[in-house]
Image (tube, helix red, strand yellow):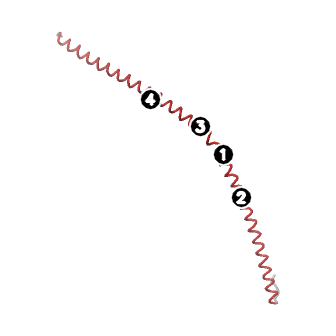
Amino acid sequence: MTALDEIAALQRNRAALAELAERQRALRDRERTLAADELELSASRQELVQYERKLLEEFTPLVAAQVALAERQEQEVEAMVAALNERAAALAADRAALVKRLTELRAACLGEEAPL
């Protein structure tokens, strides 16, 4: 191998080493960027967890109050339905008594005997 060949080989090696050094520098820069992004993501994740806990603390009593209100309203509706059913039964009994009494009065006015 001649001196020129050796010089050319050394220049190729130097160029290859420079390219490798540049790639190494770029990879280290990328590694720093990724590490910074990871730290930022971790901080954001922690902030989100804290926000979630705060929301849970705020919403839990509100939901409990709404559930209690719904239960009370359900009980009130059940009581109203029961009262309405009682009134409907009483009205039906009053109507039957009125129909019977009207029939008796009609029969008395017409001089007929009331049907049994």
Q: Secondary structure at mark 3?
A: helix
Q: Please, what is the three-letter code of the amino acid marked with disc 3?
A: Lys
Q: Quadrant of the C terminus?
A: bottom right
Q: Earlier in the sequence, mark 3 or mark 2?
A: 3
Which residue lies at the image location 42% right of the left edge and 27% below the top edge?
Answer: 34
| Dot placed on the residue nearer the N-terminal end, 2 or 4 | 4
Q: Position of residue 84 (x, y in %)?
A: 73, 65
Circle 3 residue: 54
Point out the tag, 2 or 1, that comes first from the N-terminus.
Answer: 1
Q: Is residue 19 above or below residue 2?
A: below
Determine whether, in the image, residue 9 is placed left or right of residue 28.
left
Residue highlighted by disc 2: 78
Q: Would you say 66 lies left or right of 101 here?
A: left
Q: Are marks 1 and 3 in contact (CB under 8 Å)?
A: no
Residue 72, given in percent of the width and then of the height, sits at 70, 52
Question: Which residue type carries mark 1?
Answer: Ala
Q: CA distance from mark 3 to mark 4?
A: 26 Å
* Mark 2 and mark 4: Cα distance apart in space: 58 Å
**Circle nearer the N terminus (1, 3):** 3
User: For residue 37, which numbered disc appears in the image?
Assistant: 4
Q: Which badge, 1 or 4, is on the more N-terminal residue?
A: 4
Q: Residue beneath label 1, please?
A: 64
At horizontal 67% and vertical 47% (from top left) the residue drawn is: 65
> Front-most of 104 and 69?
69
The secondary structure type at the circle numbered 2 is helix
> From what the image shows, is residue 48 above or below residue 65?
above
Q: Secondary structure at mark 4?
A: helix
